[in-house]
Amino acid sequence: MDIKRMFRSIRFFLFFDQLKRGNYARKKKIFHHVGKNVRLPAMLVPLHSELISFGNNVEVASGVKFVVHDAIHGVLNFKYHGEKNNSEFKEQLGCIDIQDNVFIGSGTIVLGNVRIGSDTVIGANSLINKDIPAGAVWAGIPAKQIDTFENFAEKRRSLIYLETAEERWKAFDERRRHKDKSDY
């Protein structure tokens, strides 16, 4: 890790607020582009971060990895030339473009040469290895569409929000009792 990347990563960690971290990334031009209202978790600044772009209103949960490069070139060069630094096989790099109104769930891996369209939700621990069209909810390994963005939003609008932990536990236990009865 070069010294500039290491310093940026340390400074990045010092912000406890995800929105402030996104604003810092925009101000310091850590990524290709960082729009407004971008919330980034504490993370190492990814290698080749200049190949990653965030639109407006993007939230990235903890543990998300952006991988814009591969490392197979070293293995191939060593196999065919006896040294990793031979120039026959080169490192492959690809851009990641995250458009507006996107949520990326915890533990997701986003590979290079991928665009995530606007109005998209990516479920936790997903693998994004191809372009994701706008207006949908995707999850899985590899990610598959599981819902539309609008349908997901409607479901969230109809949720009843509980204020206390006690209310949440009561509702949780009630759902479990109902589920257990329907299993027979």
Image (cartoon, rainbow, N blue to C red):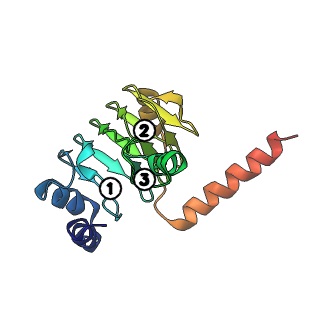
Counting residues from the start of the chain, the first of labels 3 and 1 encountered is: 1
Q: Nearer the viewer, mark 2 or mark 3?
A: 3
Specify the amino acid type for callout 1.
Answer: Leu
Q: Residues within 10 Å of mark 1 (few under 14, many from 20)?
A: some
Q: Residue furthest right?
A: 184
Residue at the spot 24% in from the left edge and 65% down from the top edge: 5
Horizontal side, residue 79 vs residue 136: left or right:
right
Specify the amino acid type for callout 2.
Answer: Val
Residue at the spot 25% in from the left edge and 70% down from the top edge: 15
**Which residue is tagged 1?**
47
The residue nearer to you, when weighing 66 against 175, is: 66
Find residue 65 and name its label.
3
Secondary structure state at the residue bearing disc 2: strand
The answer to whether 180 is drawn above or below residue 100 in the figure is: below
The residue nearer to you, when weighing 38 against 152, is: 38
Horizontal side, residue 8 vs residue 145: left or right:
left
Horizontal side, residue 42 vs residue 147: left or right:
left
Res. 155 visible in picture: yes
Where's residue 171, x and y in %?
A: 62, 55
Where's residue 165, x and y in %?
A: 53, 66
Secondary structure state at the residue bearing disc 1: loop
Q: Measure the C-alpha gap from mark 3 to mark 1.
A: 11 Å
Q: Nearer the viewer, mark 1 or mark 2?
A: 1
- Quadrant location, the C terminus: top right
The residue nearer to you, when weighing 140 against 3, is: 3
- Quadrant location, the N terminus: bottom left
The answer to whether 86 is drawn above or below residue 42 in the figure is: above
**Which residue is tagged 2?**
121
Q: Measure the C-alpha gap from mark 1 to mark 2.
A: 24 Å
